[in-house]
Amino acid sequence: MNKIQFQYNKTPEDTTHREAIVLSKPNSNYFTVDMTELDNDQRQRLEKGLDEYDTKLKELFSLRAEWLRNSGFGSNFRNFSKDKMSSVV
């Protein structure tokens, strides 16, 4: 679990200190598996395997979200623009 603390500058007049558990880190790049040089059999094996893992991950993310909602944390989800964050610890 990754916890962070930071100053969030919604506007120049509205700055708050925040503490959060990171569910997804911000990123401006695509993190990929490059299939350019794979043959058809390799592509099919890769896609089938990743589809299976993606299905399991979606189920786990769904269970996590359901637990958060059922535990009373459903209204605590937030997206923070990394450009408006400072003093991140």
Image (cartoon, rainbow, N blue to C red):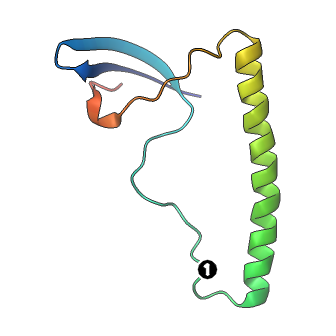
Left or right side of 34 for 30 = left
Q: Quadrant of the N terminus?
A: top right
Left or right side of 3 for 71 = right
Q: Quadrant of the C terminus?
A: top left
**Which percent across, then down, holds residue 22?**
52, 29
Residue 69 or 33: which is nearer the viewer? Answer: 69
**Which percent across, then down, holds residue 2?**
53, 29
In the image, residue 42 sits, relative to residue 16, either above or below, namely below
Residue at the location (34% across, 21% down)? 6
Residue 82 or 11: which is nearer the viewer? Answer: 11
Left or right side of 58 for 76 = left
Residue at the location (24% across, 13% down)? 14
**Which percent across, then down, holds residue 68?**
70, 19
Q: Residues within 10 Å of mark 1 (few under 14, many from 20)?
A: few
The outermost residue toward the top is 72
The outermost residue toward the left is 12
Residue at the location (44% across, 15% down)? 19
Q: Look at label 1 and name its amino acid.
A: Met
In the image, residue 21 sits, relative to residue 23, either above or below, namely above
Q: Secondary structure at mark 1?
A: loop
Q: Which residue is mark 1?
A: 35
Q: Quadrant of residue 49?
A: bottom right
Q: Count the numbered circles shown.
A: 1
In the image, residue 34 sits, relative to residue 24, either above or below, namely below
